[in-house]
């Protein structure tokens, strides 16, 4: 019964005619409302589905008739694209990380950028594929702009694979399939070529790979050869030429403040000098970890300044990065070094490649392992570190670190460049048994596995054509969803 009498009863008894107060909520009603609020409050964020995909990979390997994401069409495919991209960017969205919106807009701007920035989506379509093929330490994200000039252990510019963020043990064919699709998309968007020319360029990439693999199978020089300015093909020689810049000019044009004692504040850099003591310890630890002697061009490993780096990359745009300025041996701001710390994540291929017994390590350690295997005598600053409980990879920034400008390639040089990229990828794979964990002859196994080679090359080309058309449809879905705000917030489970 209500605690407040109805108005009619009040009038009959001669009591006040003032309006009655609304009935108090009963304890059971209160409890129901509280429970409803708790259900909303305790909604569960949808996190990584890595383990679910790992189980699907195992199911596909065991029974190839299992449906995979690439088999989904229509609205179901649209949901898959949306949810995969949201999952891949969940931390950045939830933390409102710097550069997240910029990255989403960048992905919408072109098919090639979408391809570069959605490695997880691409590789989920491949899950469980090629279980019979020889395993290598795969690069994981092969495309025309993940090759370039960088410093080796002697500070000499070399050309090779230069992005190890997704490195993982996987069938060698995974790198070939993504690389072939990447060259076809880039040849279309950056070169303006039709399908026939795209396929010719892609074939050159594959031919370069198998030429390189045959070379290293015969001469066994994968641990000593390097593509330098003196032995590179003409198209790569031009890249070395473009990369030449005096270290002093490079430092003062872009990085140093007016006194040369630290970083210059800019759109790219925000100095955080208050953290110098913290990062000096990280540099000292990296020096011990990599047996870096504080002599010669490296100097004493003395830290001058630290800065946050903003707005770099496509796939990694929005991830935390730090630049450390180390004093050079001359101590006059003309030969300083810059070491980068970049947040490391799981490989996009993790849980998707056929099961095997090889382990490249976790996050930063995995990336450092990738560089040490893929490059003969590579950058001595490649390593791993932990900052604020998160895993980071490390490497040196250098004045001659240079990537190709695809716009400048002629019809002839496109094919020459593709062949050179295939060659250095073959060398990276060939090192998987000597520098990596494999216990069998990688080169001979790969050459045998692809016989007859002409048929295998055409199979990869056709697979890439299908992947490109699928990606084209995915890109349309993505742009429409982005415009409607689909990537403003991550998804949650509601009870």
Image: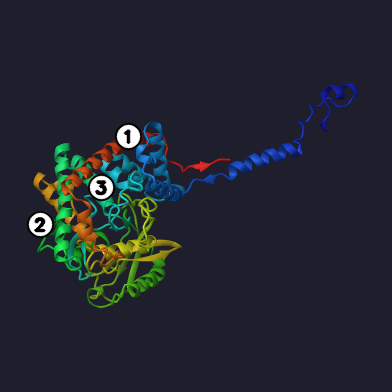
The residues tagged by marks 3 and 1 sit, at their Cα atoms, a distance apart of 22 Å
Residue 268 percent location from the top left of the image: 31, 55
Neighbor class of circle 1 (other Cα within 10 Å; few <14, some 14-19, many 20+) is some
Residue 301 percent location from the top left of the image: 31, 74
Residue under label 3: 177
Tell me if 251 is positioned left or right of 215 in this view: right
- Locate residue 81: give its quadrant: top left
Q: Secondary structure at mark 3?
A: helix
Question: Measured along the vertical axis of the image, is residue 472 above or below residue 142?
Answer: above
Residue 190 percent location from the top left of the image: 19, 42
Residue under label 1: 476
Question: Is residue 205 in sight in this rendering?
Answer: no
Residue 284 percent location from the top left of the image: 36, 74
- Locate residue 462: give its quadrant: top left
Q: Secondary structure at mark 2?
A: loop
Q: Which mark is residue 233?
A: 2
Q: Front-most of 257 and 188?
A: 188
Tell me if 347 is positioned left or right of 161 in this view: right
């Amino acid at each position: 019964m209500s605690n407040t009498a109805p108005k009619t009863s009040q009038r009959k008894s001669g009591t006040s005619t003032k309006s009655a107060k609304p009935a108090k909520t009963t304890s059971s009603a209160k409890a129901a409302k509280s429970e409803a609020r708790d259900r909303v409050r305790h909604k569960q964020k949808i996190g990584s589905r890595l383990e679910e995909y790992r189980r699907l990979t195992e199911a596909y390997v065991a029974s190839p008739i299992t449906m995979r994401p690439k088999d989904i069409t229509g609205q179901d495919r649209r949901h898959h694209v949306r949810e995969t991209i949201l999952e891949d960017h969940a931390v950045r969205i939830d933390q409102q990380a710097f550069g997240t919106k910029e990255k989403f807009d960048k992905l919408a701007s072109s098919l090639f950028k979408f391809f570069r920035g959605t490695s997880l989506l691409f590789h989920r379509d491949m899950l469980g594929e090629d279980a019979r093929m020889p395993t290598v330490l795969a690069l994981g994200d092969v495309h025309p702009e993940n090759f370039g000039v960088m410093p080796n252990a002697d500070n000499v510019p070399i050309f090779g694979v230069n992005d190890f963020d997704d490195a993982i043990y996987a069938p060698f064919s995974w790198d070939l399939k993504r690389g072939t699709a990447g060259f076809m998309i880039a040849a279309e968007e950056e070169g303006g070529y039709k399908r026939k020319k795209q396929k010719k360029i892609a074939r050159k990439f594959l031919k370069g790979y198998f030429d390189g693999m045959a070379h290293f199978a015969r001469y066994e020089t994968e641990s000593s050869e390097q593509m330098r300015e003196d032995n590179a093909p003409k198209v790569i020689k031009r890249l070395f030429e473009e990369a030449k810049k005096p270290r002093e000019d490079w430092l003062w044009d872009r990085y140093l403040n007016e006194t040369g004692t630290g970083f210059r504040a800019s759109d790219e850099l925000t100095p955080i000098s208050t953290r110098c003591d913290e990062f000096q310890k990280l540099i000292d630890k990296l020096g011990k970890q990599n047996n870096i002697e504080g002599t010669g061009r490296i100097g004493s490993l003395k830290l001058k300044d630290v800065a946050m780096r903003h707005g770099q990359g496509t796939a990694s745009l929005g991830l935390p990065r730090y630049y450390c300025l180390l004093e050079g041996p001359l101590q006059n701001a003309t030969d300083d070094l810059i070491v980068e710390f970049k947040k490391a994540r799981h490989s996009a291929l993790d849980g998707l490649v056929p099961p095997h017994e090889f382990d490249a390590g976790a996050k930063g350690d995995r990336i450092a392992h990738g560089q040490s295997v893929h490059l003969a005598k590579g950058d001595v600053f490649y390593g791993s570190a932990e900052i604020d409980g998160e895993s980071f990879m490390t490497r040196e920034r250098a004045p001659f670190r240079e990537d190709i400008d695809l716009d400048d390639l002629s019809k002839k040089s496109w094919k020459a460049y593709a062949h050179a990229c295939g060659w250095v990828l073959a060398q990276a794979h060939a090192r998987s048994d000597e520098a990596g964990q494999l216990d069998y002859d990688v080169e001979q196994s790969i050459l045998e596995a692809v016989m007859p080679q002409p048929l295998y090359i055409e199979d990869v080309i056709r697979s890439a054509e299908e992947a490109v058309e699928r990606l084209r449809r995915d890109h349309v879905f993505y742009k429409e969803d982005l415009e409607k705000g689909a990537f403003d917030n991550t998804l949650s489970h509601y009870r």
